[in-house]
Image: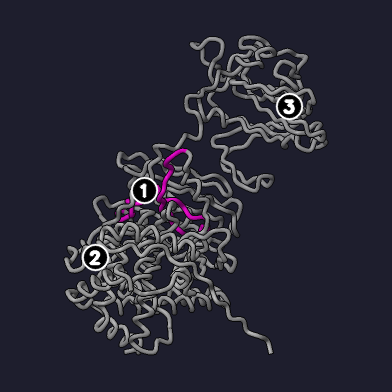
Amino acid sequence: MGDWQELVEQLMRERGRSLTAYAAMLVGRDGDAEDLLHDAVVKVFSRPRRLADLDHAEAYVRRTMPTLAIDRARRRGAADRTRTRSFEREPAPADLDAGLDVRRALRSLSPREQACVVMRYFDDLSVPQIAHELGLAQGTVKRYLHDATARLAPMLGVEDPGPEPDVVDLVTTRRSR
Amino acid sequence: MSELGDALKNAHGEHQAVLVTPDAGRTVAAVRRRRAWRAGGTVAAAAIAVGAVAAGAVAALGPDEQQSAAFEGMCNLDEYPLPRVEALAGSQYYGRAYLNLETETGVYHRANGELIDIVRDHDDDEVRRWSDLGYDESPIQAWRYDDDEMPVLVFRDLWLDEWLDADTGTFADRVVVDVTAAQTPQVVEDPTELWWEWTTDVPDQTPAGLSAGLAGLVHDGFLRQYAFGVALGDVDHDTRVWRTVEREDGTVTREPLLLNGPVEVIDDLSDVVRVTTRISIPGEEPYEIVSTRAAGASYDAVCGENTSEWRPVTFANVPPDVDESYSWDPYLTGPESAAFQCGAPLDPALERQVDEVRRVDGIVWEEEHQGQRDYGSGATIVTFTVPNGIFPDYEWADVASPGWEGSYGVGDSSSEGEQGVHQYQAPVWVNDAGLIVGVLDHTSIEGQRRLVAGFEPVDIWFGEGLNGPVQGDAVLYDDAPVIPCVDAAQPVSADAQPVILYGEGATTDTMTWMWFALEP
């Protein structure tokens, strides 16, 4: 048994439920969450990587999921049966009630808004970090967050966090010796 | 953190608490498969350096291992079914690709059972093309790399945009193509036909100079509803290739497949029970491939049942290539009637002499055309010379009478359509009294094809080209469909002699007319 296989099994055994719940916030229904996790793990482990430990592997898989979820939604939107068939193996089980109101509210957003909100308010990433992860402009991320939170806040009975503050990137330059 | 952040984290915690631990087995198997495929890609890359031998090594990865790993618990082989390759004459069939032209993705089912996701390449993609290196599956087997530097197989352009036309609605947003040694992939109009009713027998011995694979490709064209021409390789010019088709009602048709000549598709296979391709090379035993239909044999599902949703291409919204409502007027009813009329004699002043007349029959190799022609029961080839002028005062005209052609173009002074020529050419039949009594049947497609002009093209576009006398051939088949043009009730006598009418001019009203008798 290879090291990677042991790590995958440990990851799924010890962090699988947390990662599935995380995935469920990024997809359109609970039934797709496990498939998203599956694909994220496959993507991360399908090539040799230096994954030091379980925490490192979990972080890597989690960071992979938002982009995969957006890609998947785009393909599904294009009615691409061939590319999305791995998500259509069998009827999805019913959504679990636990935390469902929040997931339903998230699913009222566009896939990109959904990903931005989860990364900002669950993962506590900054706007530049989200922009980097998703390959978006910072202004675009801010607009997604602004629009999304304006809709989510009344649905969840929380205060709208309001617009993101402007961020100035600090750039470190390396001097040549 | 904000209230929103707390809401998300609380919901996540509640949800996680009631979930069951996901099964790692499926994910581990998928990772193992992807890693194996990646290794296969590495082998494939190595194949570039050493050519066909290494490419064979890619295939030698084998369908069994990959299939069991790739489709464990999820069998897509019947969703993208492979036709029964054993029904073919061993004709270098590489696989069937199911292509979604709208999403530019697809699945390629290789003949060895391997199922591969593919995407379409674009001009701006950096695609490694195996075709440049002689690899056989070039329409499919190129690749680029994804973000993770995984090789991604692509299908190349394949003129498939012809099948997807947003302006006219539906050509086909999904197309199935077969990939064979023919290089050009063939569109499969009916993907539900998987050839399970057919068996094919191929001789053990192959005559010298003949490629069994390419011969099989020509034969298998009937099954794929695709016509492959017979190219001249090392075989003798006198080689003959015949295709015989037998139908349920006992009808047998036999037609030659000409070297470097056209081949026609067998339109209706529904009642065909046997197709035979017979190749006779001088000095060699005839080579005969026979396909036989056993009605009732059905698809043998790989994983359970045929679950394919791919259906025949529908052409409902495809505009026809030609306007079928268009019909020709009879011969000698157009502008040519100013010089030639049915029932009237030919003007002796317009007579010109032919250069040569010769008789041919059967299948003949022609050096000039580098191909065989079939003259059937017999034909007369008439060689004659015409003025071949180009006229600066050319005027375009739309003529509905058969026999008319025209060319016009831009000359050196670049004013559009400033010079050109109208040409007319047609045979008529005259009786002993010198009167025109018969013309070609204008309603017969065969009739239209029975006169083959061999003039060099008029080089309008460069002005100073072939503006002067030119020699060409006309072919008059003995069985040309001749109809009476004076009295429909009076058939044209077998004694009537054919005459070639010719004219050219700037306008249809200012033609220079002439005619050529075949007999002195």
N-terminal-most mark, 1 or 3: 1
The answer to whether mark 1 and mark 2 are in CB contact below 8 A is no
Q: Disc 3 and disc 2: Cα gap in Å?
A: 74 Å
The quarter holding residue B341 reads top right
User: Measured from the top left, where is residue B19 in percent x and y?
Assistant: 19, 74
Give the amino acid at mark 2.
Asp
Q: How much space separates mark 1 and mark 2, taking CA atoms?
A: 39 Å
Residue range corresponding to the magenta coloring: B168-197
Secondary element at image label 3: strand
Q: Residue B452: x percent and y percent?
A: 63, 33
B512 in relation to B139, above or below = above
Verify CB contact (< 8 Å) between mark 1 and mark 3: no
- Reading the image, the residue beneath label 2 is A30
Pick whichever, B336 or B7, lies toward us.
B7
The answer to whether residue B134 is seen in the rendering is yes
Which chain is home to disc 3? B
Q: CA distance from mark 1 to mark 3?
A: 45 Å
Whether B181 is among the magenta residues is yes
Considering the whole magenta stretch, tell me its main secondary structure.
Answer: loop
Horizontal and vertical percent for residue B493? 55, 17
Q: Within 10 Å of the Cα at label 1, are there few (<14), some (14-19), or many (20+) other Cα atoms? A: some
Q: Residues within 10 Å of mark 3 (few under 14, many from 20)?
A: many
Mark closer to the observer (1, 2): 2
Label 2 environment density (alpha carbons within 10 Å; few <14, some 14–19, many ≥20): many
Secondary structure type for disc 1: loop
Secondary structure of the residue carrying numbered label 2:
helix
Write down the residue under mark 1: B190
Question: Is B461 included in the stretch rendered in magenta?
Answer: no
Residue with the mark numbered 3: B421
Image quarter where the C terminus of chain A lies is bottom right
